[in-house]
Every structure is written in structure tokens, then in C-alpha cells.
Amino acid sequence: MTKTADFDLLIVGGGINGAGIARDAAGRGIATLLVDQGDFGGATSSASTKLIHGGLRYLEGYHFRLVAESLAEREVMLRLAPHLVAPLQFVMPHVPTLRPAWLIRAGLWLYDRMGGRSSLPRSSGATLRADGFGAGLKPEFTRGFTYWDTRVDDARLVIANLRSAVEHGATVLPRTRLVSAQREAGIWSAALASSDGGRRVTARVLVNAAGPWVGDVIGRTGGRMPAAKVQLVKGSHIVVPRVHEGEHAYILQNTDRRIVFVIPYMERWSLIGTTDVAVDNPDGPWAITSAEARYLLDAANCYLARPLAEADIVWSFAGIRPLYDDGKGDPAAITRDYALVVDEQDGVPGLAIVGGKLTTYRKLAETVLERLRPWLATNRGPWTADEALPGGGAPPGDLGRDFGGGLRQGEVEYFLKHEWARSADDILWRRTKAGLAMTPAERKSFAAWFQGIIPGQGKSGGEAG
């Protein structure tokens, strides 16, 4: 006999995919619970290159469906979250020995058209002048190409989706670990653990959106490892003082046929990334290595008029991407597409997500709900493409103490009350990036103040270089 469940849907993982699924499901009237062992967006989803983009380089791997879907989603996100997603022009200096001009033109022609109607300008050739598209580059780079994509605040995109999920009735629990789950009497029975103690909940369907820990959660839920294996790939980024004038970004071809982005970041800095390094352990260390830092510096220095040194790095961050292993040995060549693996036993379904990218999270959520339609009855179909994401932000009025880096006490109190922040790092490096603009003394002072508000949670500052 089937028991009555507490929830229709239990989602494990509060990164962008889990947040998007929770929002979509709750908006369809599905009783939804989402849990994450740490902070929401605290792992892979806050360690991206901060782009909503089609992935121009994926065309070389013939991933046409992924690029087309990503470009279409780019347009949707410009409508849904104009406060988080903004157009960004990219400049690619031409290096004839790496890729011929005709190949780049052909790729850009496809890129302009694959996603359907776009509100962004189309690509073009460009003359690289020191006071324009060649700013900061060596004078030998005189010709290139431009195209448009969009930038995003990745961590805040996660929070906006979760705020929307809660507004539609979802329950979300940060810092709550799934200890185990098993199928009993036609439903899932799950043991959860947090600092408040343990509890048990039941659900009709379980979705494993644990990202790098997808395999671990499969083991804790008695599931079968999917035929599509997970390849963990570390991507690292560095932040340096601004390397060029102008609001455009650079996409730089490297001699290993990878590309490296140089993106204006928070007015005073440039973000350079990313690397692709295969790793075995999802638990870390999640820090850039000296070899990765040297790789990014060398790639950028091939183009920059003023070479960068390791001493120029003011911040670095790294994340582990759980890619769908399609059998290609080179981490850079592994597809960024996603696979959904349904494991039904005794009429009780579980679904695991392998791979995926920030850009396609909303479409992935729609696909997950469609796959689960036989078990999650709802009268509402897809809806998330038509409702804007919450704007968020602190309430107007006296914002109180100035902690430095543009961070004020009123904002901190808002993050604590409405956005599940519980540590200084949650605020300095995810809800905001104020830690980058603060001095070490200011970060230390904020951590001490924060520890007085929430004892034992004030540790901070470890992510700055």
C-alpha cells in the first residue's frame, strides 16, 4: 500500500539546476522541497565565467543543438532577468596561424542565426586600434572580429530562482545534507541532517541535482550508476587589475586550440578564465594551482601589451564541473550538454542530472518536469519563460554601517533575513563580490562583526589573493 508523502518532489542540490527545477515545479503547483548540504550556489554555480552564452567554441565540436538551445535561452534570460543579465561585446583578435579568417567568419555567421531572432547586434569584422577594440593589446594585432553575448551574476541568479520558488510555495533548506534515502511503500523516505539535528521526510519523486556530488547521492539513494559516467573537470579563474579601457571583452585563441576570456569585472578589474583540468575528488581542493594560474597568465600575455605576473592576481576561484563523459579524453572537448537519467524501481522514480551549463538551466528544468510528468500530475505546463525573476536588493532607507567595498549593514541584514546567508563568505563572495573591493583589514573586521551576529560563522577572507 502506497503511503501519503510529505512532498511531491524532493530535490537534492541547490545550485542553478536545482534552483531552476524548484522554481518550475513550485509554479506548477507541485509540493517541492529542495535541500543543499552547503550554501545555495556555493559550489559550481558561483564559480563560472559569469556568462549566459551560446558557446562559440562548441561549434568546432559540432554541438549544434546545444549552441542553438543556449542562444535561444540567452534571449529568454535577457527578458527574465535584465537586472542580472546584460549584453557584452566580445573582440577576437585574429591569429592566422591558429584559425583561418574564413572559418571564424563562417562560425560567427552560424552563431548569429542559430538561436532564432536575437535582440543583440550581429557579428562583424573589426580594426583593432589602441583607443578602441585593440585597447591593451600588442600593436601587432591589427584585425579581428566582434560578436555579442551576455554576462550574468551567477550566484545571484541562483538566489533569484530560489526566491521565486519560495514565492510559489516551495520549501528550501540550505546547509541540510541528505544522509540517505530509500524507496518504501511506493514513496521515498529520506533522512536529512543539519545543525538543528536530523529529520525524516517523504516524497513521491527524488531529483538528484547535486552537481559534482551526483555520484555520491546516487550511492546514498540506492540508485544504479548511470551508463553516462561523470567526468569531474576543474575550471579556475583569476582576477587582475583592469587590463584595458572600454566595455568590451576579449576572447583569445590559445596555441592548444582552447580559448581564454578576458572580461571587464566590477569596473576596476579583469576576469580571466578558464582552465579545464580533470579531477577525481568533488570535495576539493577547490583552489587554483600555480600551474593553472601560469597557464591563464601565459595565454593572456600572448596578446597583452603589458604582461601580467602572478603578483598581479588579486583574487582567484575554482569550481568543479560535473560533465557528461562522452568518451573524449580531453577535458576541453567533453560536451557541456546534459543527460537526464531516470531510475525507476518498484514504481518509485529517481532522476539524476549529469552535465549541463549555466545558460541552459531553465530549459533543463522544463525537460526534467516533462520527463517526470507520469509521476507528477499537474494542470499547468511550462511557464518560466514568461515570468520575470525577482529583482531582490535591500530595502530603501538608512543602510547603516559601511563595512567597505560598498557593503552596508542594511544589505547584510536583508541577505540574512531573505536570502539564506549564514557566513561572511556567503555575503562577501556570493551574494555580493564586496570582498574583492575590501582591504584585508576590512574583511577581517566584517568577519569579526558577523561572528558577533551569528557565532561561529564569521570566518572569511580565504578566497582573496
Image (cartoon, rainbow, N blue to C red):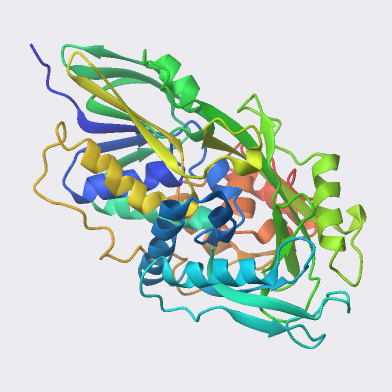
Instruction: Give the answer, above or below, for where 398 lies relative to 352.
Output: below
Taking depth in this image into account, of 307 and 337 the one nearest to the observer is: 337
**241 sits left or right of 173 in the view:** right
What residue is at 58 percent from the left and 74 percent from the top?
A: 147
Instruction: Give the answer, above or below, for where 156 lies relative to 175.
Output: below
Whole-percent x, y for residue 41 in the image: 51, 45
Whole-percent x, y for residue 460 in the image: 70, 44
Residue 190 falls in image quadrant: top left
Taking depth in this image into account, of 342 and 39 the one nearest to the observer is: 342
**265 sits left or right of 65 in the view:** right
Residue 151 falls in image quadrant: bottom right
Whole-percent x, y for residue 187 in the image: 20, 19
In this figure, what is the number of numbered marks? 0
**178 sits left or right of 321 in the view:** left
Residue 182 falls in image quadrant: top left
The N terminus: image quadrant: top left
Whole-percent x, y for residue 192 in the image: 38, 22
What residue is at 82 percent from the left and 85 percent from the top?
A: 130
Taking depth in this image into account, of 53 and 14 the one nearest to the observer is: 53
What residue is at 72 percent from the left and 52 percent from the top?
A: 257
Taking depth in this image into account, of 164 and 270 the one nearest to the observer is: 270
Q: Is there any visible trace of residue 406 in the rendered image?
A: yes
What residue is at 90 percent from the left and 72 percent from the top?
A: 305
Q: Is there any visible trace of residue 448 in the rendered image?
A: no
**12 sits left or right of 49 in the view:** left
